[in-house]
Image: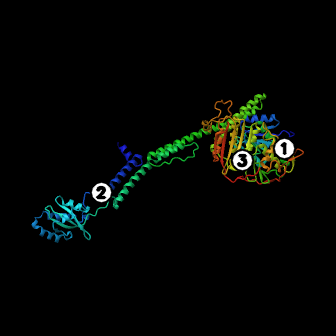
Amino acid sequence: MTMKLSGFLNLRRISGQMAALVVTSVVALHLIVTAAFLIHRPDQIDPLVDHGHSQLAATIQLIGTAPAAERPRLLADIARAFPQFGIESLPPGQASAHGPGIHPGLGSLRRRLGPGYRTFWLGAEADSYKVGIVLPDGMMVSARFIPDQRQRSLWTTPWMTTLLFAVISVSLLGLWAARALTAPLSSFAKAAESFSLNGAAAPLPERGPEEIRSVARALNRMRERITNLIDDRTKMLAAISHDLRTPITRMRLRSEFIEDEAHRQHMLGDLDQMRSMLESVLSFLRNDRKLESMTLVDIASALQLITDQFTDMGHKIVYDGPEHFMATVRPDDLHRGITNLVENAVRFGAETTIRLGVGADHLTIEVEDDGPGISDERKNVMLEPFVRGDDARNMDEAKGFGLGLSIARSIVLAHGGELSLKDRQPHGLIVRVQLPVRELRLQSAA
Amino acid sequence: MAMAAPNILVVEDDRETRALIAKYLSANGCNVMTATDGQAMVRAMTDHQVDLLILDVMLPGEDGLSLCRKVRAESQTPIIMLTARGEDVDRILGLEMGADDYLAKPFNPRELLARINAVLRRQSAALTASAAHGATALTFLGWRIDFRLRELRNPAGARVAMTGAEFDLLRTFCERPGRVLSRESLLDFTQGRNAGSFERSIDVLVSRIRRKIETDPQDATMIKTVRSGGYIFTPTVEAVAPAKNT
């Protein structure tokens, strides 16, 4: 029980902070309401602002209860003692002449006089009013009267506006404090959503109440563990790929001593396939960590070189674009990326086109084939690593791990560009690469 | 080939690979010696005449790159590096350390043989060749060809992509400006690289180089065709001091 209570009272915990917030708000509001009450005091008549109404009422009551014979003397005594009231008797008939005039200032006087007395309005003087009073026995007196001046609205007094402002401020502050307490929670959700394996995101800040801090710590530790796990896997994959080169090198050398030429060619084909798979895994793993430096390159001639290389391998491929175009890129990375795209294109289509388009601030490279194309729902999946377009086929025919497109894409992304898959009419696929042009380009005529 | 059987020293730590390379090269007319590490390599080089060194990058003890630099400091013996991977760092480091060529494992043994021949030929030709001998980069008409980085940059400073065969052919032209070179001799100098399945004729390679460097490939002014059957490289070629590329 004490544990629970101390935990609740601990200001570093979220419950303690919530409780403190509630208590502080309640106390602040209570103080404000109390102050408002004390300033306004609707239950008390403030003697300082009474203007002598009570005295006047008492004097009138004194006259009203005195026998008629004593009244002239009493009136004279009162006139001597309270000259400020200017009380004198009125001849009868005045009341009917003036009627029971209702004046808002007379209300408090009537309340003080009690039943049996009537008041009526007689008119204004320099700084006061003249009022007529009918005593219970019908006699009338007149008196000078300073009307009740507290006619202003409760809410327009400076004190009350201040208090109103304070209430609103305290409420808003409370809302703000409550938000500040819970804001880290929504930032956690965002951090978890945006968690990516490249480890670029900064760790969550470990601040706020104790509970929030421990959640942030736990999330940060979890992220560290996941990153380490993936790093270990990556290292293992790289090590395996690396170490496989030695036996493949030996086998390549051994295959040179195979007498049977057909047999030898088959073996070389298998070894080539193994090698290209290893290369693609290694370049996929490398892409995440290491970037080639940017340099000015004649992109048009780089694309023509790829065209030449595939032509030499017996593929039908054409280049369509300017003879020369210079831009700043990572030459070897871009060569590998576009080569991957062309490898896919020549595998699925009979005829391939590499197209270079030049815009004001970007350039577009399109690799177009006339193969079967990719359905819209498969397009996104195809960009993921280890997804092969020819999933119906088995490993015997598949050429790689399905890394080509995702390697190309990450190379393009590292250039600040984008890669998209478009349909070609009537059939086929267009892989469109858009790269920002970073530096001045010099275009020479062909 | 008229050349006498070259003495080749293979430095490779994997026993199987070493034995297989030795067996393959011996079967193709080379005298092969082997070494497992740097110490054995130094011993072999003091005891024997070595015409060419095949050096693995990954070696126990002192690695291939530092061995390469040591050898280069003392002699002009050609070196072909065998790298674990075809990464740029290894390539540039290997060539900056003074290696003449490199091959990424797993390599095609026939390509290794072709490169050995090309490097040896280049070595013997360079000894008698022009002032370009010894330079790591040459310039002509604002173009710059860098042998260490194996790259060509145009007058604007942009890198122009080339295949190995194209580069070797242009290099051959640049090292012999103003001389008529027959197709046969050009083939001889350049078949080292792209040897194997996709070899192109010299004419195709020349037309591809022209497309990259000539203002008008139809009316070539740099690499001119000679009627009697060959080509001549007309620009003036100058050696440049090695400088870092940006």
Q: Which mark is residue B186?
A: 1
Residue at 86 percent of width and 42 percent of height: B184
* Residue at left offset 46%, top offset 48%: A183
Looking at the image, can residue B50 be seen?
no
Where does label 2 land, which residue? A37
At label 2, the amino acid type is: Phe
Q: Quadrant of residue B8?
A: top right
Colouring style: rainbow
User: Mark 2 and 3 residues: CB-CB less than 8 Å, in contact?
Assistant: no
Residue A90 drawn at (x, y percent)? 17, 68
Q: Residue A160's x, y, as percent?
A: 34, 59
Q: Residues within 10 Å of mark 3 (few under 14, many from 20)?
A: many
At mark 1, the secondary structure is helix
Assign a secondary structure to mark 2.
helix
Q: Chain of mark 1?
A: B
Residue at the spot of label 3: A299
Query: Looking at the image, is mark 2 or mark 3 earlier in the sequence?
Result: 2
Q: From mark 3 to mark 1, how far is it between C-alphas?
A: 28 Å
Query: Could you tell me which quadrant the N terminus of chain B lies in?
Result: top right
Residue type, mark 1 in image = Leu
Q: What is the chain letter for disc 3?
A: A
Q: Is B218 placed above or below A149 here?
A: above
Query: Is residue A397 shown left or right of residue B182?
Result: left
* Residue at mark 2: chain: A
Left or right position of A433 against B25: left
Find residue A248 and report its image quarter: top right
Q: At numbered mark 3, what does the secondary structure look like: helix, strand or loop? A: helix
Observer-nearest of B242 and B144: B144
